[in-house]
Structure formats: structure tokens, C-alpha cells
Amino acid sequence: MCLLFETVRVQNRQLHNIEAHNCRVADSRHIIFDLNDNLDLRDSVSIPDDLDDGVYKCRIVYARTVQNVEFQKYTPKRIRTLRLVYDDTIQYEHKYLDRSCFDKLVQSAQADDILLVQHGYITDVSFANIVFSDGKNWITPARPLLHGIKRQILVQSGLIHEEKIMDKDLDRFTHAAIINAMLDLDDTPRIPMENILLPR
């Protein structure tokens, strides 16, 4: 069975950006399973009584229906270095539970994470979208592996802009940051461009 998942930010016992998550679930279920019924994740998520007002990850595994829901206290990964990795074969248009395509690349990178390049274009890190600052604007690659929900919200709000970014363009920027459903632009650490390492 093809399994997918969503990671939803829970804070103050509230699900954040759940409509955006529902839209992505609907798209994936339609494309992969040819299903057009409405699967509202809220119907499958019950906030445990022992959750406080802090930040938690709610991981929802699903296919045709929701398979599993679990909560975990959120601790951000410390990403200080990224290694450029070239691989034109990885496809991750949907948020698949099987992430083995990334695991070996990350393990051998000798960095905190990878920055994947496909056909000369910058895409994503292994678990999030990326944005770059040129000193004035935040710019995100127009050819991501996965169209993340936080990326979509920030693009629609005009806080970040899409551009095709090639590996040779990286010297335009001063620093980078990673964004996903758990990390907003305001609270994600900045990564100096000198910490984006050349391929091994």
C-alpha cells in the first residue's frame, strides 16, 4: 500500500493551517488513488488531554483513509550546514511515508542535511523547502521537489517569491533558511551561504 503523511503543527492545542493540509491530502488522494471524496483530517484528530499549550508535531499517516495519528513534542532540527547533492532521479511530488530515497544521501553527506540539485536547479533540503535572501527579498526555488504548505502560504502572501535558481546562482545570496509546516520564516535559523558545502 502507498502510504503518505502530513505533519501538522499543534500549538495552544490548535491545529495550524489545517485547510492547506486538507487541500494537499485531497490532491494526493485524487492523483494516486483516483478518489474525489472529502477527507477532512480534523475528523481523525483528537487532541490528547495531556497536551499542554506548547508546540507539538501531529503526524497523520493516510492512504485511502487515515491509518495512524501520533503526537510528539516539537524540537527543531539544528541545521547549520547543507551539502549540495546532485541526483536527477528522485521524485517526491507527494509526501510519501517512504523517505528511503533521502536517507542514504543524508547519511553520507557529512553535513546536517542535503540541498538537492536536479538538472542543475536547486530544489529542496531533505525534509523542507528552502528560501534564500539576497539582502532585500526572500526567494524560493520555482522547481521544488514538494510544494510545501508553508511555502505555498508564504508565496501567496507575497512574503517570498519564486525563481528558478541554478547551482551557479547561489553566490547571489547572503544566507538561506528552511521552511515547512513546523518552521515559519520568522523563527527558522539563518544559514550562511558559506555553510552550503560543495559536493563530496
Image (tube, grey):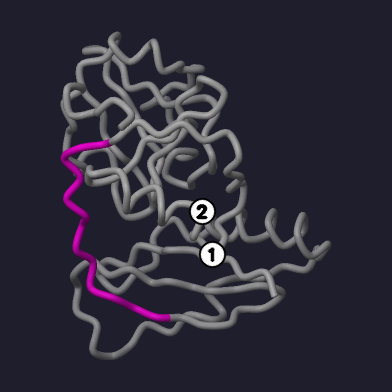
Query: For the N terminus, which image quadrant?
Result: bottom right
Q: Mark 2 belongs to which amino acid?
A: Cys
Q: Which residue is mark 1?
A: 98
Please, is residue 41 above or below residue 105 in the view? below
Residue at disc 2, secondary structure: helix
Q: Residue at x 72, y 68 (%)?
A: 38
Along the line of sight, the residue nearer the viewer: 65 or 3: 3
- Spatial CA distance of label 2 from label 1 is 8 Å
Query: x%, y% of residue 99?
Result: 49, 59
Residue 64 in the image: x percent, y percent?
71, 74
Image location of residue 188, percent across then percent down: 21, 42
What's drawn in magenta, residue-wise? 70-82
Q: Secondary structure at mark 1?
A: loop
Secondary structure mostly taken by the magenta-highlighted segment of the chain: loop
Above/below status of 47 relative to 197: below
- Extreme-bottom residue of the structure: 49
For mark 2, what is the residue? 101
Q: Position of residue 102 (x, y in %)?
A: 45, 52
Q: Is residue 92 left or right of residue 54?
A: right
The quarter holding residue 39 reads: bottom right
